Image (spheres, grey):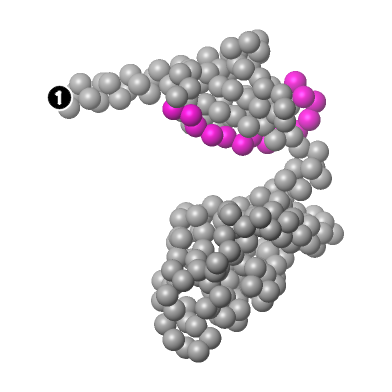
Amino acid sequence: MVKLPSLKFLRRSNDETPNVSETASHSTVLDVGAEKLGKTYARALLAATQADGSTEVVVQDLNAVCDEALQHNPKLQMAFESPQISADEKCRVVDRLFGGNSHPALIKLMKVMAGRGRLGYLAAVRDAAVDLADEAAGRVVAEVRTAVPMSDQLRGEVTEQLSQRLGKSVRLRESVDADLIGGMIIRVGDTVFDSSVASRLDKLGKSAAAGFARQLMEQSDRFSSSA
């Protein structure tokens, strides 16, 4: 996770100490315009990176900003959303936190969004950019639900099997469902592959189930030894 410095240096445009809990009235989750704005800025970002072939790198950097910084630092997200913090101050925050680690095209976009009061929509931009990059690369997104997190080996096997089955490059979107007793469920668009009925994927499902069983056994052993 990206280690962020203190946010105490944030100031209102009138130099008063801000209350970052005073967020903008809009929400990137609830605002119905978030998706549209996200696509608009995402298209601009990808267009700016196509010439030098840096699209994948920029999308990775954008993922890191959203998943490692904003998700784990709600005060930073609130600061990005707050109308009480000036655009210039937000740009300085962007430079200070991400200038040395993120692609210049992403830094430029974030500053443009700050200047237009849209920096709070960065997560929506990420979602749109990932989808657009997948579409441009001909990748298919497969949603994979398992009882426990997949190992790197299992993740690679699932990706390979799906790529062969679909004839396209595949990106996994993983989720864990503790109520799923064993195996896995895979959805690609409107098609659902249940590992209990798909022969080749069934072997992978059994690997996931075995991992789930091992985890239960380890937890049981730890409990017994501590009793």
Work out whether 178 lies above or below 96: above
- Residue beneath the point at 76% across and 37% down: 139
Residue 4 in picture, x, y percent from top left: 45, 65
Q: Is residue 35 visible?
A: yes
Outermost residue to the left: 227
Q: In screen coordinates, is 17 left or right of 221?
A: right
Residue 171 painted magenta: yes
* Quadrant assignment for the C terminus: top left
Q: Is residue 207 visible?
A: no
Q: In screen coordinates, is 165 left or right of 97?
A: right
- Residue beneath the point at 39% across and 19% down: 214
Q: Quadrant of residue 27?
A: bottom right
In the image, the segment drawn in magenta is 165-178
Q: In screen coordinates, is 55 left or right of 80?
A: right
Identified by mark 1, the residue type is Ala
Residue 187 in picture, x, y percent from top left: 66, 27
Q: In screen coordinates, is 116 left or right of 215?
A: right
Residue 180 in picture, x, y percent from top left: 48, 22
Outermost residue to the bottom: 14
In front here: 203 or 19? 19
- Residue beneath the point at 25% across and 25% down: 222
Work out whether 53 lies above or below 179: below
Residue topped by disc 1: 227
